Image (cartoon, helix red, strand yellow):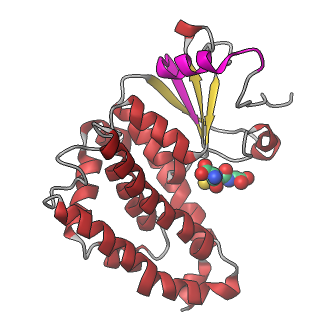
Amino acid sequence: MSPTERLLFPPGIPTAKLSEAIQHPSHIKIRYFKLTINALPSRYLLACGNVSWESTYPDDWMQERSSMPFQCLPILEISSSQHGTGDKESGTSVVLAETTAVEFYLANLVGMMGDNEYEKYTIMALHSSSKAIMDNFATYCAFNVPEAMPKAFQKWRDEYLPQWVTIQDKHLVANGSNGHYIGDKLTLADIRAAVVINYFESQPDAKVWMGIISKSEALMKLKAKVESHPPIAALRASDEYKQHVEGTVGMFSTMSPWTQKL
Ligand SMILES: N[C@@H](CCC(=O)N[C@@H](CS)C(=O)NCC(=O)O)C(=O)O
């Protein structure tokens, strides 16, 4: 059986109706691998909201890949029976794709995109800075070609990661080192930064990376605050989450043997 085609624009449904549907979801599926990485901020956000949700996983990714809007995950499949655009049982749903769009949508849904336009765009800026450090690390360090790895490792250790830490620390200290970027609110900016740290913690060279990150008390406080937020703490205590961590650590431990050679 060929996999369901996930279309950004399902034929015959006006975008106004799709818009209504995503504003009133009855159930959300987040489809990703049994990993933390790019689904973790979204899973945290979903845990903080009131909408029923679940994680789903591809059975045969190579078969499913080309049916995805951008041939990658995560995606959200949003049912909104109220608006007749989706149904949990039949499997029809509205699809949102690409990590950043998915996180902005969910953060907005659960009230973590700030209280006004200025806060919203500042959260987007902070999110962009944190997501970029993680994406770039993945491309240029974790999964780089073996011959480039020793240089890449040194650059990340001596320049790129310390720079990100210094920048985040400055903004957090300016807000009173209370574990948040904006006032005393938990926002997507906090969640993304906490996930970046979590990502570096999953690397084979976690000791090196955490040695750099932990120089910022403000960042470590932010991480602790995000991870102890009750719905997030509950998610992190679940067996499913533990499986995702195991999968992530396992994947990186096989893909970065170069780090031991330095
Ligand atoms: N531009 C995408 C990239 C997502 C991405 O790289 N997803 C990876 C997992 S983290 C993936 O689906 N890899 C499987 C593949 O490319 O076949 C986004 O921001 O969501």
Q: Report whether residue 45 is seen.
A: yes
- Residue 208 image position (x, y, % from top left): 40, 80
* Residue sitting at x 16%, y 61%: 177
Q: Quadrant of residue 112?
A: top left
User: Where's residue 116, x and y in %?
Assistant: 30, 37
Q: Residue at x 22, y 43 (%)?
A: 185
Identify the residue at image location x=53%, y=51%.
Answer: 38
Q: Is residue 257 above or below residue 239?
A: below
On the image, the x and y values in percent for residue 168 come to: 31, 66
Establish if 181 lies above or below 208: above
| Residue 27 sits inside the magenta stretch | yes
Q: Is residue 238 left or right of residue 71?
A: left
> Is residue 15 covered in magenta?
yes
Residue 208 against residue 95 in the figure, above or below: below
Q: Nearer the viewer, residue 243 or 1?
A: 1
Residue 228 drawn at (x, y percent): 24, 47
| Quadrant holding the C terminus | bottom right
Q: Residue furthest left?
A: 176
Q: In this picture, which residue range is highlighted in magenta?
A: 11-30
- Decide if residue 68 is on the left or right side of residue 120: right
Q: Quadrant of residue 172?
A: bottom left
